[in-house]
Amino acid sequence: MSILVVGSVALDTVETPFARVEETLGGAASYFATAASLYNQVNLVAVIGTDFPREHLDFWRGRPVNMAGLRIEEGRTFLWAARYHMDMNTRDTLDTQLGVYAGFHPVIPEEYSSSELLFLANIQPELQMEVLEQVSGVSLSVLDTMELWIMTARAQLTEVIKRVDMLLMSEEEIRQYTNSASIVKGVRQLLDMGLQYVVVKQGSYGALLFGADGTFFSAPTYPLEEVIDPTGAGDAFAGGLLGYLSTVEPQRGGRYSVDQIKLGVVHGNILGSFVCEDFSIGRLRTLIMDDVAERYQCLVACSHFDPDWRFSQPGQVKTVIR
Ligand code: AMP
């Protein structure tokens, strides 16, 4: 099964309290494509400027990343700069320069038309809508967004939310969009818009899955000793989620079961944790499935507990009824 992603490919300048990197490979689609291509073929739709370093394209040529939908336009690649606070979960955006994205309209190549999974990575909601107008028959469509679009393009974002299956949002974004102090109430509002699933991203604390059918799942998070750069964790999360789903058969009717979606969220947490171990896609370059499998077992061990516990008073003798 192949995965279609439309989003930003960027050059990021990132500052943490401990280090700084300049114009390194970034962009939501870049993180997603690199993470998901560990599992399956990724069909990329994005635009880059003529200044984009060729070495990044060479890296993706060595992975199952189809770049037929990656346009190269005269001008500058999308530039983004941010500074992280000491907690390494919150950041200030210092600069956003759309560059060639200013005049971009996504075109889905014919050869991508059989993609079963769709990720609308962070990009202007109007462009996300243009993608939805061009695709049909996907088994699962997943949407990501950010504060900028909640604040500046709310109406367009709302139209996109109404047309996808799953929405990924951080706790803060849910509060901003729904105006609800309670995340659970905010999620309820979002599900009432027709979504099947909402995933609440909690930074280094993992992710929560809410389903329209009443599903609630708290995916375990990997206790990382040191976070070097959390940029792209949400996109790598989506890469792990859709990457995993691309390796399993959906049920009859082309829908994934809740259990498959839950495992997808676990894979999302795993890929999200790896990306934080280096700047840019540094850690994802060398990541292999054995590393993912090892972290998977670690999450099983740290989240498994005795389901048979029952309350009894200290000293109370249990009466066994036969
Ligand atoms: P995340 O850390 O998952 O929120 O993703 C960060 C990535 O999103 C960075 O690599 C940026 O290049 C990219 N990004 C930041 N702002 C925007 C924006 N306004 N539109 C599209 N992509 C963006």
Image (cartoon, rainbow, N blue to C red):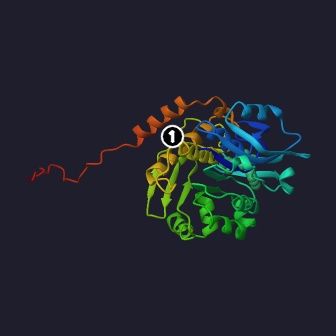
Q: Is residue 208 among what the camera can see? A: yes
Residue at 53% over, 41% down: 247
Closer to the camera in the image, 286 or 68: 68
Closer to the camera in the image, 195 or 236: 195
Helix, strand or loop at label 1? It is: loop
Q: Is residue 83 among what the camera can see? A: no
Residue at 83% over, 35% down: 53
> Furthest-left residue in view?
322
Relative to residue 191, is residue 308 depicted above or below? above
> Furthest-right residue in view?
74
Quadrant placement of the N terminus: top right
Q: Is residue 144 left or right of residue 212?
A: right
Callout 1 crowding tier (Cα within 10 Å): few <14, some 14–19, many ≥20: many
Q: Is residue 279 left or right of residue 182?
A: right
Relative to residue 236, is residue 97 depicted above or below? below
Image quadrant assignment for residue 230: top right
Q: Amino acid at mark 1?
A: Tyr
In x, y percent, where is residue 147?
Answer: 69, 60
Please give the count of numbered marks on the rendered protein. Answer: 1
The residue labelled by disc 1 is: 222
Closer to the camera in the image, 154 or 305: 154
In x, y percent, where is residue 85?
Answer: 68, 47
In x, y percent, where is residue 273?
Answer: 57, 40
Closer to the camera in the image, 277 or 215: 215
Residue at 57% over, 54% down: 139
In x, y percent, where is residue 299?
Answer: 45, 39
